Amino acid sequence: MDNTQEIAAGAAIRLGGIAKRYGDVRAVGHVDLTIAPGEVVALLGPNGAGKSTTVDMILGLTTPDEGTVSVFGRTPADAVRAGMIGAMLQGGTLLDDLTVRETVGLVAKLHRRPMPVRDALRRAGVEDIADRRANKLSGGQKQRVRFAVALVSDPDLLVLDEPTAAMDVGSRREFWKSMYSFTDTGRTVLFATHYLEEAEEFADRVVLMRAGEIAADGSVAEVRALAGGRTIRAVLPGGVSEHLVSTLPAVTSFELRGERVALSSSDSDTTLRALLAAVPAVRDIEIGAVGLEGAFLSLTSDETEGAVR
Ligand code: ADP
Ligand code: MG
């Protein structure tokens, strides 16, 4: 086993350079991501960022054009078959004529080692509506039933695509409370969301996607700092060393190409003063909101799914 395989085997999810196009649209471009067992990760990004496409590739519902996906060292199909993955998808449907209990029971029968149906109903907070038919449920209740369906195989990994999309604030809180009982047992969760607050509150780690790529990956605090920052672009006549740029105050990341620099700063005023002092000949300075801004603007707006950047 070479090193890459070892890492893949130890990881809950490993994406190695995955890419997916739909015609002219690059839905996901070269994404590398490793998620360790026990991590609760938010895949955060505006509509059209490529979250669902990424999730679908992890679940084996879509095949990447390039790159590899492994889940607990297996192919997605194998991991799903082994009951290791529970999934809650955007726009997944329920069978109208079945009651909640029947729905969850049906899914339990598909798995080798399901948890008792009663437990799944309780954990998802749908015990009290267990005898209701799916066509009599509100949007938020349907989401919780989908959650029960995701839980019932007693999976090691839960993958949730915008799980709280149809819920009001109260149901959202209830939903995440039931999620805690799952993550408390050390299991792995990856959830896609376009709500920054939801990522902040419930994830240990935030992977921010924008235009099919990972724009930031880190703790909530790290990603927040990036989101609040600015970019500075400038020409540095004659060029400067990487060391000089990297030691400017408040710089969070930078790219240096010949005489051109583009950097992100958590405090652009301070960075700029230092840059002017260090390189008095600096010219063509442009300051802009960090590239994440587009993402975060959409995060706070109420666009419907399908609307693109
Ligand atoms: P998100 O879940 O972050 O909103 P998606 O993964 O659904 O993003 O979509 C990423 C991009 O790929 C969007 O531009 C979307 O329109 C496009 N896309 C997704 N699925 C399809 C598809 N089946 N056919 C064509 N384009 C698609
Ligand atoms: Mg989506």
Image (cartoon, grey):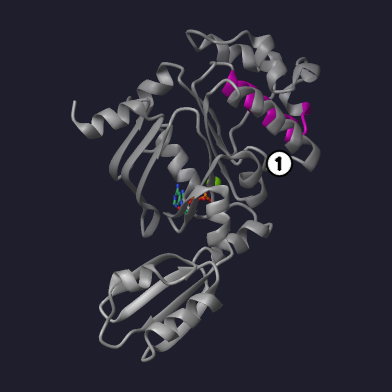
Q: Residue at x 55, y 65 (%)?
A: 294
Badge 1 local density, few (<14 within 10 Å), some, or many (20+)?
some
Which quarter of the rendering shows the N terminus? Answer: top left
Give the SS element for disc 1: loop
Q: In this view, does 30 lie to the left or right of 129?
A: left
Q: Position of residue 26 (x, y in %)?
A: 38, 56
Asked if residue 143 lies in the magenta stretch, the reply is yes
Q: Where is residue 146 in the image (x, y as percent from the top left)?
A: 63, 27
Q: In this view, does 7 lie to the left or right of 136?
A: left
Q: In this view, does 71 lie above or below 34?
A: above
Disc 1 marks which amino acid?
A: Ala
Q: Residue at x 72, y 25 (%)?
A: 134
Q: Position of residue 42 (x, y in %)?
A: 55, 42
Query: What is the magenta segment's predominant secondary structure?
Result: helix
Q: Residue at x 32, y 79 (%)?
A: 260
Q: In which quarter of the image is residue 166?
A: top right
Q: What stretch of residues is rendered in magenta?
A: 136-151
Q: In this view, does 201 lie to the left or right of 277?
A: right
Residue 95 visible in the current orientation: no
Q: Where is residue 296 in the image (x, y as percent from the top left)?
A: 59, 60
Residue bearing the label numbered 1? 166
